[in-house]
Amino acid sequence: MDRQIVYIGAIPQDTDLLNTNKDAMVGLGFLMRAILGENTYAAGLVCSATSPAGMTVNVGQGSIYSLENIDNSAYGSLAADTTHQIIKQGIIEATTNFSCPAPATVGESIVYLVEAAYEDEDTGATVLPYYNASNPSVPFNGPNNTGVSQNTVRQGVCFSS
């Protein structure tokens, strides 16, 4: 697994931290690929009836393991990497409830398919403070003091539908 090198007294760069996170993800992805191969696997995600019984089902917490591009879009200031693939882990921590209404026409039936897939999801949007070189005691709000919020987390999620 690659590791970033930083030096005492050097000015830290945003890529130092981003590459550390990316290197850890790639290392784990190759480990999972060595163990699981390149197929998609799911763990947990148990589908069960609601109690009391109704026209809904619950899908329990779990995870999915899928061969994916390292990054389909830029990760902070790091460019997208759609050339290389690793096994990624998507997690769903809470039970998800799905509605399964009866058909509108008497005598007809409906078959419902509940699916799960891996998805990268950028979340945690917030207006970040930025360094203001002209007045360091008053930070900028957002890039170039625009007040624009930016995502702060890229989550690997198990998306179900």
Image (spheres, rainbow, N blue to C red):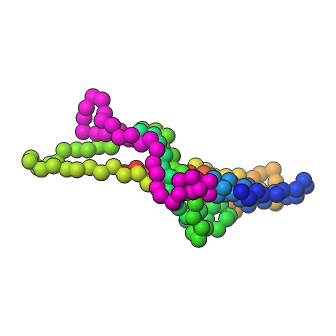
Task: In this rendered view, identify the residue nearer to me: 145 or 24.
Answer: 24
Which of the pair 117/125 is nearer the observer? 117
Name the image quarter holding residue 14: bottom right
Q: Residue furthest right?
A: 9
The residue range painted magenta reads 30-59
On whether residue 32 falls in the magenta region, the answer is yes
Farthest left residue in view: 107
Measuring 84% from the left and 56% from the top, which residue is drawn there? 6
Q: Is residue 29 visible?
A: no
Front residue of this view, candidates 106 and 151: 106
Q: Report if residue 37 lies within the magenta region.
A: yes
Q: Residue at x 58, y 49 (%)?
A: 124
Position in image of residue 98 (x %, y %): 33, 43
Q: Residue 88's spot in the image, x, y percent?
A: 55, 55
Quadrant of the image containing the N terminus: bottom right
Q: Please state if 107 lies on the left or on the right of 54 as rendered.
A: left
Residue at 57 percent across and 57 percent down: it is 33
Using the rendered image of the protein, determine whether residue 89 is visible from the camera's viewpoint.
Answer: yes
